[in-house]
Amino acid sequence: MTYIEAMAYINTTPGKAWTTLEEPSKFQGWMSNLGKIIEPLQKFEGTGFVQEFKIVGNWKPSIDWKPTKIEHPHSLIFEGYGTALSKAIIAVNFEQIHEGTQFKISLSLKYKWFAKIFAWVLLERLYLRRTMETRLRKTVDAAKTLAEGRQVSGSY
């Protein structure tokens, strides 16, 4: 299993951050750093979304994400299934700290039996873990930028 997380302080309330980040047009702006969104989200409370990841060469596995736990405006959990994954979880948390929000995203990936060795070698021992950590950091930074009302540049 692979687990990574990233955090940022957002200079706005959890409710305002939540409302901004769940907008479909803005959602793609910050979540696309992890992977290309090929089926967009409608709202956090609505349908899920499909995300395509570029892993190695032309291999682009996808994950079908569905919201499984929603506690507006504090936490949101998406559960996903896809190529080589028996289960993936993205947890998004908005915690009130003073006048702002501690924003945290964690990603955990549990692999299907046939992919465990491959995933361990690529994700834990070679370059992909660092790549995923960098992409998650960019995702959190882009969310912070959008939630604070600034423009995001670049993605996936």
Image (cartoon, helix red, strand yellow):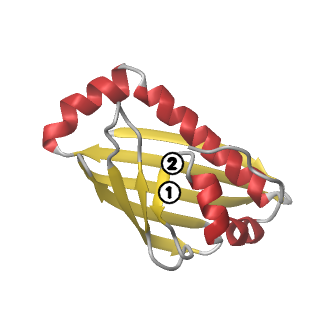
Q: Tell me the element at label 2.
A: strand
- Tell me which amino acid carries mark 2: Ser
Q: Tell me the element at label 1.
A: strand
Counting from the top left corner in percent of width and height, residue 93 is at 60, 58
Counting from the top left corner in percent of width and height, residue 92 is at 56, 58
Where residue 33 sits, quadrant-wise, is: top right
Residue placed at 43% from the left, 56% from the top?
Answer: 51
Going by the picture, which residue comes out furthest to the left? 114
What is the CA distance from the residue labelled 1 to the residue labelled 2?
5 Å
Where residue 57 sits, quadrant-wise, is: top left
Instruction: Provide the residue designation for mark 2.
Output: 106
- Tell me which amino acid carries mark 1: Ala
Residue placed at 35% from the left, 20% from the top?
Answer: 125
Tag 1 and tag 2, C-beta contact below 8 Å? yes
Going by the picture, which residue comes out furthest to the bottom? 46
Number of other residues with Cα within 10 Å of mark 2, as a class: few under 14, some 14 to 19, many 20 or more: some
Counting from the top left corner in percent of width and height, residue 121 is at 28, 23
From the image, which quarter does the N terminus lie in? top left
Counting from the top left corner in percent of width and height, residue 55 is at 38, 36
Instruction: Provide the residue designation for mark 1.
Output: 91
Most foreground residue, 4 or 85: 85
